[in-house]
Image (cartoon, grey):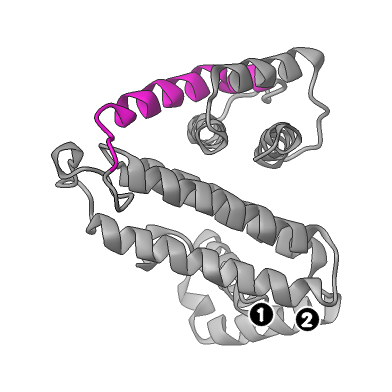
Amino acid sequence: MNYFNYFTEIEDAFIRRRGKHLLLSPMDWALIESWKAMKVPLHVALRGIERAFDSWEAKPRKRSVKSLLYCQEEVEAQYAEWLESRVGAETGGDGEVAAAGNKDESLPFPRQTILEHLRRGRSALLQAFEKRKQSHEDDFTEALMRAASLLEELERDFDHSATADAQKLEISLTGLERMLSDAIRTVVPADQLEAITKAVKEQLRPYRKQMDAAVYQQTFDNLLLKGLREHFAVPRLSLFYL
């Protein structure tokens, strides 16, 4: 991950989660510079931003988030926890974490099962990227490559952590899925969106009268996004799909 990408990935994540385009201030750029100087891994910084906005959305305030400084405490807390997770992470000749450093009892699945899931996801993203770039050079094509690169970083970090944390990994994977979903919405042709929308409405028609309006809308949105992912061959990355 080069210097330029480190800044742009953080900027993109902040703007995407904020929901409105907002240019970063010189102070925000200086903050990113400080994270870079501290050697905060990109995926850790992104996870901190996701956590900060998740917390804000859980208890909405009247005032919106206007600066990356809002995420500083969470990013640096995530970095401190990441550093702690690296203690004792010695690798053997085969590149795996030494058995003495493994503390996988709290993982919902064996570490190797999770790693294989990440590898499958990365492979599917790269396949989708190779196919897409033959006919398109757009935001979605770029998002596929970015997601594959970030997923590789997550895979490597999870593999070499002395204390692998599935919950933190899930936050990062959710962030990648959100990025891909947003990119899909920017490129889906109107006729394809209309066709998928029509199919989802037809699927839900027998149940609509029995569903609360909010539940119906949430179910509709989920099924629509599922249809879009399938159309664009985007894999589910969440550990819930293991």
How far is the residue under mark 2 from the one under mark 1?
9 Å
Q: Quadrant of the N terminus?
A: top right
The answer to whether 216 appears left or right of 170 in the picture is: right
Q: Which residue shows up at 53% across the image and 63% down it?
A: 122
Q: Which mark, residue 231?
A: 1
Q: Which residue shows up at 22% across the image and 50% down it?
A: 107
Mark 2 surroundings: few (<14), some (14-19) or many (≥20) residues within 10 A: few
The answer to whether 19 appears left or right of 23 in the picture is: left
- Image coordinates for residue 225, horizontal then vertical, percent: 61, 68
Looking at the rendered structure, the kind of residue marked 1 is: His
The answer to whether 135 appears left or right of 215 in the picture is: right
Q: Which residues are magenta?
A: 68-91
SS state under label 2: helix
| Residue annotated with mark 2 | 192
Mark 1 surroundings: few (<14), some (14-19) or many (≥20) residues within 10 A: few
- Image coordinates for residue 224, horizontal then vertical, percent: 62, 72
Between residues 203 and 137, which one lies in front from this camera angle? 137
- Residue 79's place in the image compared with 216, above or below, is above
- Image coordinates for residue 91, horizontal then vertical, percent: 29, 41
Q: Which residue shows up at 54% across the image and 81% down it?
A: 204
Callouts 2 and 1 close, C-beta under 8 Å: yes
Between residues 6 and 199, which one lies in front from this camera angle? 6
